[in-house]
């Protein structure tokens, strides 16, 4: 069956100087706020466990420090020792196998940048839950419930943030189970944590050379103001939102996908880079193949590449399963396309399929500069944050 056509970014062949346009996009992405925030992760991870680069496999230092004897033998420590490395904002702890159990317990947390909460408090509250659900789905899981921590100068300032959070909880069918509040803070701030469960895990550490990189995104939305937020959620039918998220664990349970990453505020390419670095591989991505809203103007390429798309994932898929994955999402009218190939090495390069004579250019080489993982042996294991 031929590939299912999806709308894509305006081809770089339409530029007078495609090479210069491609280089300018790469430079702008490297200098972007989304990339900068992700590069902070390595320093935080190293600070939480400074010996991580030289530490032996097993429970992390903070778990060993609780009680050396208990940490060496206790059931929690055993789970921590076997915890699956991940490159998402999600911890994954194996559960004991049982007729009605097993799989992995998933735990994620997101804190929103202060200016987002101040500028668009309702959507900040809504997004805080939405992004956590994407993290759980990217790990092949289903959400169980969330808790929140909110800071605001007074109760009135907290109302729109909490209203957005409550609206998302109702639309996605995931309850807010509790949390923490401080209504005497100097500034507004919000963090939300989510608990989930995966029967079959998708790990960002499993992409392999030869895999095809695929991007799936919901294009049935619109820009929210001038910010890089593609809102494909707040006006969508709740049953569709829930069904679309359920496609990720279904994909994992069918064995169709090797690795996945939700598209975060680092944008589609920053999120791809996070997946690749976690797996210790590189890739070449064809910008002209990336799904994008129909009619997107060439001047909006960078905005789309930096966008948080409400519903978006990067997948690493064995070549013989690409068609099945595309059909899986096309049945739900979600745009899904193969956009590149996973390669040996640690570099992410950008190409323009509409200009085949143009050599791919380097976006980032994790062998030369880490993105989210600390340098050294720790880069082969689990980052504490994502």
Image (cartoon, helix red, strand yellow):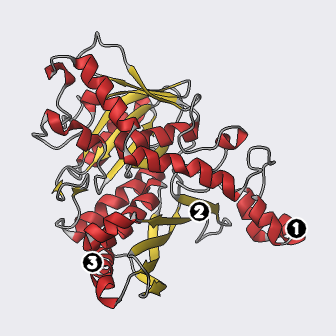
Residue 374 place in picture, x, y as percent: 64, 43
Helix, strand or loop at disc 2?
strand
Residue 160 place in picture, x, y as percent: 27, 80
Image disc number at residue 167: 3
Q: Earlier in the sequence, mark 2 or mark 3?
A: 2
Q: Classify 10 Å Cα crowding around label 2: few (below 14), some (14-19), many (20 and above).
A: many
Residue 264 place in picture, x, y as percent: 39, 52
Q: Relative to residue 295, is residue 23 drawn left or right?
A: right
The residue beneath circle 1 is 68
Nearest the eye: 54 or 116: 116
Nearest the eye: 174 or 36: 36
Find the residue positioned furthest to the right.
Answer: 69
Find the residue positioned furthest to the front.
Answer: 186
Look at 23% across and 53% down and name the residue there: 332
Look at 29% across and 57% down and name the residue there: 310
Find the residue positioned furthest to the top.
Answer: 357
Q: Relative to residue 353, is residue 35 drawn left or right?
A: right
Residue 378 location, quadrant: top right
Q: Is residue 15 above or below residue 8?
A: above
Look at 46% across and 86% down and name the residue there: 182
Q: Classify 10 Å Cα crowding around label 1: few (below 14), some (14-19), many (20 and above).
A: few
Q: Is residue 199 above or below residue 203?
A: below
Closer to us: mark 2 or mark 3?
3
Q: Is residue 383 visible?
A: no
Q: Earlier in the sequence, mark 1 or mark 3?
A: 1
The residue beneath circle 2 is 104
Nearest the eye: 374 or 260: 374
Look at 49% across and 55% down and name the residue there: 139
* Cα distance in 3D space between marks 1 and 2: 25 Å
């Amino acid at each position: 069956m031929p590939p299912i056509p999806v709308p894509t970014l305006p081809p770089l062949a339409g530029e007078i100087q495609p090479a210069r346009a491609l280089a300018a996009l790469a430079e702008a992405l490297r200098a972007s706020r989304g990339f900068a925030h992700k590069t902070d992760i390595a320093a935080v991870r190293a600070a939480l466990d400074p010996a991580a680069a030289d530490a032996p496999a097993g429970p992390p230092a903070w778990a060993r420090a609780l009680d050396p004897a208990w940490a060496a033998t206790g059931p929690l420590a055993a789970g921590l020792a076997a915890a699956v490395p991940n490159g998402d904002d999600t911890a994954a702890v194996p559960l004991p196998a049982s007729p009605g159990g097993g799989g992995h317990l998933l735990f994620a947390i997101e804190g929103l940048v202060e200016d987002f909460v101040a500028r668009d408090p309702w959507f900040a509250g809504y997004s805080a839950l939405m992004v956590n659900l994407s993290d759980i789905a990217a790990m092949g899981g289903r959400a169980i419930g969330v808790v929140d921590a909110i800071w605001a100068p007074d109760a009135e300032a907290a109302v729109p943030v909490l209203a957005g959070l409550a609206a998302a909880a109702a639309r996605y069918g995931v309850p807010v189970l509790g949390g923490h509040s401080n209504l005497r803070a100097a500034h507004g701030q919000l963090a939300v944590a989510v608990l989930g469960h995966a029967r079959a895990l998708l790990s960002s550490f499993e992409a392999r050379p030869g895999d095809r990189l695929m991007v799936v995104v919901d294009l049935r939305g619109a820009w929210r103001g001038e910010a890089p937020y593609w809102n494909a959620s707040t006006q969508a039918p709740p049953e569709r939102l829930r069904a679309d998220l359920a496609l990720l664990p279904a994909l994992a349970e069918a064995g169709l996908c090797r690795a996945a990453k939700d598209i975060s505020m680092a944008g589609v390419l920053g999120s791809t880079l996070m997946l690749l670095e976690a797996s210790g591989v590189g890739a070449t991505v064809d910008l002209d193949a990336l799904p994008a809203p129909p009619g997107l103007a060439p001047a909006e390429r960078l905005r789309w590449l930096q966008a948080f798309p409400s519903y978006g994932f990067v997948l690493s898929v064995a070549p013989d399963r690409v068609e099945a994955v595309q059909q899986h999402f096309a049945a739900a009218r979600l745009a899904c396309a193969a956009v590149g190939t996973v390669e040996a090495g640690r570099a992410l390069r950008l190409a323009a399929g509409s200009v085949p004579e143009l050599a791919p250019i380097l976006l980032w080489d994790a062998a030369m500069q880490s993105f989210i993982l600390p340098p050294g042996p720790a880069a082969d294991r689990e980052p504490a944050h994502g």
